């Protein structure tokens, strides 16, 4: 009797766990991650292509030029 109840409980628990995982992932992706990604995408400009960026190449900082010490410590 106890073995049958335990097998039923394991099948029932698996169904509940599958539903709970799908529900939590749905909520996370569509209510948290989606709006966050939209905000970051609309605010950030990694290629500096929006109107407030200066045209042309950016000036390289001469203090960080190539040196023998820098070449020996690459990482």
Image (spheres, rainbow, N blue to C red):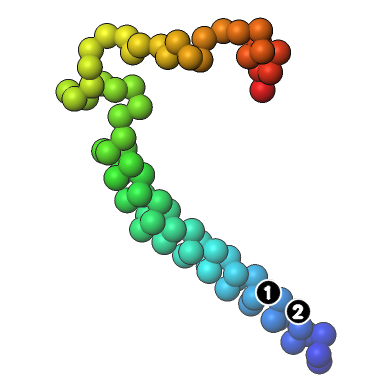
Do tag 1 and tag 2 residues touch (Cβ < 8 Å)? yes
Residue at 63% x, 14% y is 70
- The label on residue 58 is none
From the viewer's perspective, tell me whether residue 50 is left or right of residue 71: left
Residue depicted at 32% across the width and 51% down the height: 35
Q: Residue at x 48, y 58 (%)?
A: 25
Q: Quickly name the residue at label 1.
A: 11
Percent x, y of residue 61: 42, 14
> What secondary structure is marked by label 1?
helix
In space, the residues marked 1 and 2 are separated at their CA atoms by 6 Å
Q: Nearer the viewer, residue 40 or 11?
A: 40
User: Could you tell whether 9 is left or right of 18 in the image?
Assistant: right
Within 10 Å of the Cα at label 1, are there few (<14), some (14-19), or many (20+) other Cα atoms?
few
Quadrant hosting residue 11: bottom right
Toward the viewer: 47 or 61? 61
Position in image of residue 32 (x %, y %): 38, 56
Residue plotted at (33% across, 13% down)? 58
Secondary structure of residue under mark 2? helix
Q: Name the residue under label 2.
A: 7
Where is the N terminus found, in terms of image quarters?
A: bottom right
Say how many tags the image has: 2
Q: Which of 54 and 24 is in front in this view?
A: 54
What x and y, as percent, mark residue 8? Answer: 70, 81
Q: Based on the displayed image, in which of its 4 quarters is residue 12 positioned? A: bottom right
Q: Residue pushed farthest front? A: 63
In the image, is residue 18 above or below residue 52? below
On the image, the x and y values in percent for residue 37 come to 36, 44
């Amino acid at each position: 009797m106890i073995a049958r109840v335990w097998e039923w409980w394991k099948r029932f628990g698996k169904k509940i766990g599958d539903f709970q995982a799908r529900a939590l992932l749905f909520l996370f992706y569509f209510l948290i991650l989606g709006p966050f990604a939209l905000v970051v995408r609309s605010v950030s400009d990694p290629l500096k292509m929006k109107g407030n960026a200066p045209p042309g190449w950016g000036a390289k900082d001469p203090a960080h030029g190539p040196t023998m010490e820098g070449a020996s410590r690459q990482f």
